[in-house]
Image: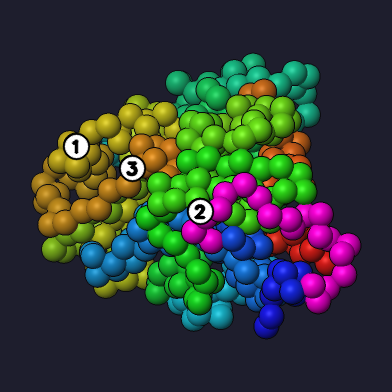
Amino acid sequence: MISRRHLLKTGLLGTAVLPLLVPRRSRAAIADVDVIVIGAGIAGLAAARRLVDLGYETIVLEADAIAGGRVKTDWSLDAPFEVGAGWIHGPDGNPVSALAEAVDAGPFVTDDESYQVFAANGDPVSAGDIEAGYRRLEKLYAAIDDELDDDMALSKAISRMGGKLKSDPILGWMTSAYTEFSTGGPIEKLSAYYFDEDGVYPGEDVVLTRGYDSIVKHLARDLDIRLNTRVTAISYEKGEGALVSTDAGEFESSFVICTVPLGVLKAGAIRFDPPLPKAHRRGIESIGMGNVTKLALKFDEAFWPDDVQYFGLMTETRGRWNYFLNYRTFSEENILLGLCVGDYARKVEAMSDADMVADCMDAVRSMFGAGSPDPVAHLVTRWSTNPNSLGAYSYSAVGSKPAHFDNLATPIADTVLLAGEHTNFEYHATVHGAYQSGLNAAQIIEDRLAG
Ligand SMILES: Cc1cc2nc3c(=O)[nH]c(=O)nc-3n(C[C@H](O)[C@H](O)[C@H](O)COP(=O)(O)OP(=O)(O)OC[C@H]3O[C@@H](n4cnc5c(N)ncnc54)[C@H](O)[C@@H]3O)c2cc1C
């Protein structure tokens, strides 16, 4: 398809949109296109895919050596280790399910009702006790919803409503293994008002046995993605387009969609000239960027039940190896995937691999006995120190409001758009939220270009 920009350049289209598309500042630019998309994660790929399909000249600039961002699958343990996103949360009606189906990604429904939880000393906790604990948690969260008259940290709100995090280990465990895991943020920083106000699609979560990154490959096909290209500055002006500076040279475009993660924006790793509007800066400051650490341990043999989906451990240190996914339920490989959440997820990432494995094996041995053998291989994640993310996903921190997320997606000077999971309150912290934000940004540009 001939791009609209080509038509504009050759004068074949009317002048209605010309003011947006006049030449800009650099004569030495590597490329001058309709749209530059920054970041080849799901949001960037969704936007670029849509714009290219519509015929717009689009380049994707990506700092990493591969596309996918926080969707990345490592097969070195002979099973899909999802470095970033692992589940399609709520697959029914979820746009990511349609993508997974298109690429035959092998969905496997993980069974939330199949679990064994252990007390800190390794004693099994009965299913009845866990269910009763869950009812206590629901009651507390309902009371927070109904009765709290001022926003505050979730931990504070829990104790104000009578929840005893220290003396009720089941409640303490659930607020970490469930709430800190799903939100990414520590309960000491989560907004009691908004931490669970986002939307969910129905249906039981699924993992993709042929790898989440099959979706990335599908979206990225035929796109012009410049890998190993780190954006350092975006200079923009209404009606003039943008000049994007990278460590590989300068690029020009009529529009920019910037999908770098919230952690990267918070760190000021990209200079905006002029600076982003106040409302955008306020959102970047107030929304939280959380963390989750994953460690896959591979063993010669499974010394745990192979038909239990999840193992929980009420570790005394909050957020420390308190949840495990059992790969044996969907894979031949003897792999336990351990998770750290909240503040501990950041702390554990400062450890060496060997120390992290030892720390996790201490938890594994609490559950399955001191004689549990050492793993033969492992893989770890360190999202909080990865310069391309600086955290795992965004959360509602005290002081942030849903509008702070959505305001981030407001066009800036009719030229720059931010997209990514952190710009979509309804579905932030998810792959589908990122995907939808990318499509929304593409739609805004399409509407502008269509006059
Ligand atoms: C550990 C973990 C577990 C998760 N689990 C789930 C889950 O089970 N289910 C779910 O739905 N979601 C999950 N998520 C969230 C989900 O992965 C993200 O919400 C989604 O992938 C974000 O996509 P994005 O396009 O917004 O950002 P990203 O995928 O981060 O894309 C941004 C891109 O920008 C690039 N970039 C950064 N800086 C620059 C720069 N200066 N110049 C050029 N490029 C740059 C990055 O390299 C990256 O490729 C998880 C995330 C993590 C980290």
Which residue in the protein does label 1 denote? 352
Q: What residue appears at the point 50 percent right and 69 percent down from the top-left corner?
A: 224
Among the two numbered marks 3 and 2 on one chain, the one whose residue lies closer to the N terminus: 2
The quadrant where residue 446 appears? bottom right
Closest to the camera, between mark 3 and mark 2, is 2
Among the two numbered marks 1 and 3 on one chain, the one whose residue lies closer to the N terminus: 1
Picture layout, residue 199 above or below residue 265: below
Start and end of the magenta stretch? Answer: 11-31
Asked whether, in this view, residue 396 is left or right of residue 312, the answer is right
Among the two numbered marks 2 and 1 on one chain, the one whose residue lies closer to the N terminus: 2
Q: Is mark 1 within 8 Å of ligand 1?
A: no
Percent x, y of residue 258: 59, 49
Q: Amino acid at mark 1?
A: Ser
User: Which quarter of the image is occupied by the C terminus?
Assistant: bottom right
Q: What residue appears at the point 33 percent right and 42 percent down from the top-left corner?
A: 382
Q: CA distance from mark 3 to mark 2?
A: 37 Å
Picture layout, residue 371 above or below residue 266: below
Percent x, y of residue 259: 57, 50
Percent x, y of residue 242: 64, 48
Helix, strand or loop at mark 3:
loop
Instruction: Judge the density around disc 1: few (<14), some (14-19), many (≥20) Cα neighbours within 10 Å.
Output: few
Which residue in the protein does label 3 denote? 382
Residue 317 visible, this orientation = yes
Closest to the camera, between mark 2 and mark 1, is 2
| Secondary structure that dominates the magenta span | loop
